[in-house]
Amino acid sequence: MNWKYTDETSLVVARTTLSGSGISCLVSTEKVQKWIALGNTPDPYVPPAITTVPIVFEDFQDRFTTQEFDAVTDFVYETDTVTGKPKRKTLIQGMSKAIALNSIDLLGVKTIAFMGALVSGSVITEGRKDIILTP
């Protein structure tokens, strides 16, 4: 089986064995160097295709129940009782930007992080997060 670079650094290679299990190691490992010395070359790294699934904000909001979205709003805009300042400024900024742009990328890093914060804050469950983010 051929070795394949795992990223653009070309430091690590991986392959699937005949039994179907996967292994990875540094390209400098003796077994890989012997394989290369026999005239072999690891397959190049091919970055995964970047996939985006943009939807309008209202469609994103409609994926939540009314109770869930009320809880999201309360969580995002919660203020510190002592200072009166927002506890989650980054979430407010992200939500405000999504509303202004009228767009959410269901597979975007920021969307996934936002939804992860909602799960961590016990606003929604992991299962609901998965359902809401399903394209």
Image (tube, rainbow, N blue to C red):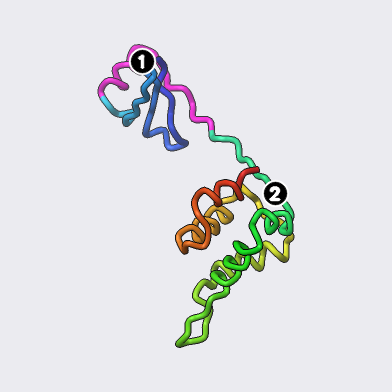
SS class, disc 1: loop
Does the magenta-highlighted stretch encompass residue 36? yes
| Mark 2, other Cα within 10 Å: few <14 / some 14–19 / many ≥20 | some
Instruction: Identify the residue shown where x is 60% and y is 36%.
Output: 49
Of the numbered discs 1 and 2, the one sitting upstream in the chain is 1
- SS type, badge 2: strand
62 left or right of 93 in image: right
| Dot 1 and dot 2 residues touching (CB under 8 Å) | no
Residues in magenta, as a range: 30-46
Residue at horizontal 48 percent and vertical 81 percent from the top: 80
**Left or right placement of residue 72 versus residue 116 in this view:** right
The circle on residue 131 is: none
Tell me the residue that label 2 is attached to.
54
Residue 19 is tagged as: 1
Quadrant of the rendered image containing residue 71 = bottom right
Q: Position of residue 42 (x, y in %)?
A: 42, 22
Q: Position of residue 65 (x, y in %)?
A: 64, 58
Residue 59: x %, y % from top left: 73, 54
Q: How many discs mark residues in the rendered view?
A: 2
Measured as percent of width and height from the top left, residue 45 is found at: 49, 30
Q: Residues within 10 Å of mark 1 (few under 14, many from 20)?
A: few
Q: Residue at x 36, y 17 (%)?
A: 17
Q: Is residue 94 magenta?
A: no
